[in-house]
Image (cartoon, rainbow, N blue to C red):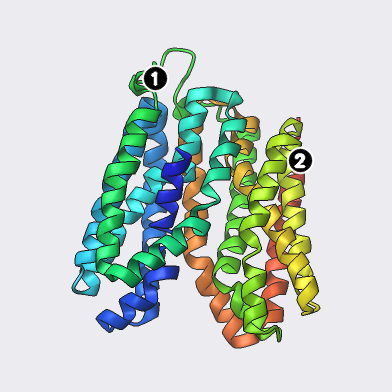
Amino acid sequence: MGIAQILAWSSTYYLPAVLATAISRDTGWSVTRVVIGLSWGLLVAGACSPLVGRQIDRHGGRRVLASSSLLLASGMLLTGLASNLLIYYLAWTLIGAGMAAGLYDAAFSTLGRLLGEDARASMTGLTLLGGFASTLGWPLIAGLEQELGWRYSCFVLAAAHLLIGLPIHLLAIPRHQEEPVDEQGSAPVACEAPASQSFRRIFLLLALLLTLQSLVVSSISVHLLDVLKLLGIASATALAIGMLIGPAQVVARLAEFSIGRNLHPTWSARAAILLCGIGIVLLLPAMPWLAFVAVALYGAGNGILTIARGTLPLALMGADGYGTRMGLLARPMLVAQATGPVAAALILERFGATPLIIVLCGLVLASLVASFALSAR
């Protein structure tokens, strides 16, 4: 499943970073219009996520994850064939549905249904492998584009989903998990979960925390290099600083897997948010050596938060109905990922880098406050 995650993230979330310029140059569409495809795909994913979660609760993740491979393959094929923006955005509609059915939220839901409250270690292992998506995917796709062009690169990625992703999903996930959950048995679907005030309060706090962090992460992912350059840091140095995020995420996830596995996920989330916040604050002095430290801390916090995204709902609300809850939580997060970079770009353009950093610090502080309202027992 980790290998399938590398393929899924490389060909969806990270795809425009590699191919947007080539697509724009070949078609005459602006880079902005090309990148809007990803934003549209994220919105589609947010709309589809609750349905995906309910299907995983009722039938297990095998069919859902396998369908994601088919959807992503169809989307990549249509992207390669796109002759106008309408077809291109239709392709991203298919990719968005595939993202909802095949990225971390669906994979976490599948592991939660398979392993119940013992799924934390598997979720950590999954994110450890998934963290290599940009490290492996960017150079591989860039190499394909250089050799074959962007259209044939999309065709190769479509074939990879059919020949690698689909068999993994069909072979890795036990067939018996396709059996529908007995709504009268011991594992009720989420619609029968307790509707108490406490339960709703926990869910809303989780949604707030994760959505705020999604705004921060998506904004930094898109605009970090621009922020560093506006702070007066040279382009080559800014690129070297940005490259620290991936390794820092992997190191932090290894630490979570080995040292922090006995911590309650709430404490892991608090520590991760604090690391992100400190990292963002340390960008304000605009000192290159300090920016290296800042981005390493931010990357470490983001790496742990990816795990907390799956383990927090499981620890605080249990395994029953976990897939449905993950789908509902994913909707505002994906909308935030689609809109956050646009809002950040407006702030960056009108006010500059420092005000954007201050706004991001405020969002991190709000999510930290929300985390302290959650139980750590």
Disc 1 element:
loop
Q: Residue 40: x percent and y percent? A: 37, 64
Q: Residue drawn at (44%, 37%), measured in percent from left and top?
A: 1
Q: Residue 232: x percent and y percent? A: 71, 86
Reply above or below: 25 against 307: below
Q: Is residue 264 left or right of residue 31?
A: right
Q: Give the Cα distance between marks 2 and 1.
A: 32 Å
Q: Residue 53: x percent and y percent? A: 42, 37
Q: Is residue 234 left or right of residue 282?
A: left
Residue situated in front as seen by the camera: 3 or 329: 3
Reply above or below: 23 against 370: below
Q: Amino acid at mark 1?
A: Val
Question: How many numbered discs, if any?
Answer: 2
Q: Is residue 64 left or right of residue 113?
A: left
Query: Marks 2 and 1: which is nearer the front?
Result: 2
Q: Residue drawn at (47%, 59%), measured in percent from left and top?
A: 335
Reply above or below: 260 against 361: above
Mark 2 lies on residue: 267
Q: Is residue 207 visible?
A: yes
Q: Residue drawn at (35%, 74%), measured in percent from left and top?
A: 34
**Is there a contact, CB below 8 Å, between mark 2 and mark 1?**
no
